Amino acid sequence: MFFLLGSLLAGFSLARLKVRPQSSKKVVAKLGDIAFFCLLFFIGCSLGGNSEVMLSLPVVGLKALILSFSSVVSSVLFVLLLVKLGGNKI
Amino acid sequence: MTIKILVYLISGILCGMFLLPSKIIAILDPITTGALGLLLFSVGFSLGTDQELKEKIKSLPRITLAVPFVIALGSIVGPWLTASLVKLTRGEAALVGAGFGWYSLSSIIISQTYDVGLGTLALLSNIFRELLAFLLTPLIAKKVGNLPAVALGGATTMDVTLPIVAKNTDPKTTLVAFYSGTVLTILVPLVLSLLLRFV
């Protein structure tokens, strides 16, 4: 957790120090893109290689999907309601 | 974007299932954390290069402070409403939703204090939430709005899904997402222990 927070802060601080931030912006963004797709691939590998997850998938997969989908839809709707209540100022 | 994300995720799952030996899978955790670190570095860098960030933070209405609490409520209400569909009690379904996407912690707490079967369901359901956040955040940001797009990732907008919010929204929303993910992460054990008293 500290490593992740540290990475976020390190990126922020380095950009704030203004050591050619604009010219390095593209390079860092490209690195971020590569890391993003690597991350997705690694997350997939971890899931595929996790026997507990893969074995429970046919048994409770549909139930889990319904619950996660309802959770996501309902939280999106609640935030949308908050935005409307706030007069779309957010 | 969504298709590209799906392709990388599915290829990873297939590799994990059929190609990679368990020794390699065992060392994937630090590699994943390294990739996430690099990713968060780039999000931080992008926020840091925004010259108007201070003004943007100041211009955020106070109502944005309520975002994580509204997401928490929505995350619980959805499963609570669909409990009968999945043949669970409303309390059990609410417990699964209260993981807010933090699958490791919620499944451990539920398995140890309530039921191993429900813990496994919480594990899978919250993994799906993270995957849904990867797949649907670009679409929700585009069609519904930036702030509703923060809701998908739940607690994971503090780290894993923060980059997908940053990629598809603006710096202001990215900051709200980070704040929201942090608050939700703190809320997971608190809400779970509260709900466990009622199931």
Image: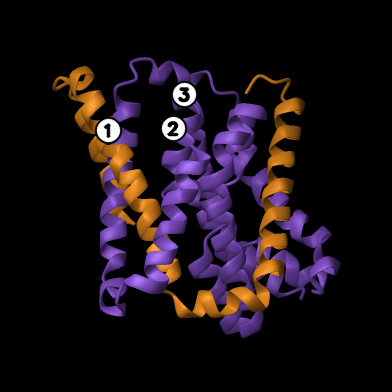
Chain colours: A orange, B purple
The amino acid type found where label 3 is placed reads Ile
Chain under disc 1: A
Task: Single out the mark in the foreground, 1 or 2.
Answer: 1
Q: Are marks 1 and 3 on the same chain?
A: no
How far is disc 1 from disc 3 in space, using C-alphas? 26 Å
Q: Earlier in the sequence, mark 3 or mark 2?
A: 3
**Residue at screen point 72% across, 57% down:** B76
Image x and y of residue B38, in percent: 26, 45
The amino acid type found where label 2 is placed reads Lys
Q: Could you say which disc has been placed on residue B57 in the image?
A: 3
| Residue B179 appearing in the image | no
Asked where in the image residue B30 lies, by quadrant, the reply is bottom left
**Residue at screen point 35% across, 44% down:** A36
| Residue A19 appearing in the image | yes
Question: Would you call the spot at circle 2 few (<14 residues within 10 Å), some (14-19), or many (20 or more)?
Answer: some
Count of residue discs: 3
Instruction: Name the side, left or right, on which B81 lies relative to B44.
Output: right
The amino acid type found where label 1 is placed reads Lys
Q: Which residue is mark 2?
A: B167
Which of the image's four quarters has the C terminus of chain B?
bottom right
Q: Could you say which disc has been placed on residue A30 in the image?
A: 1
Give the structural element (helix, strand or loop) at label 2: helix
Task: Single out the mark in the foreground, 3 or 2.
Answer: 2
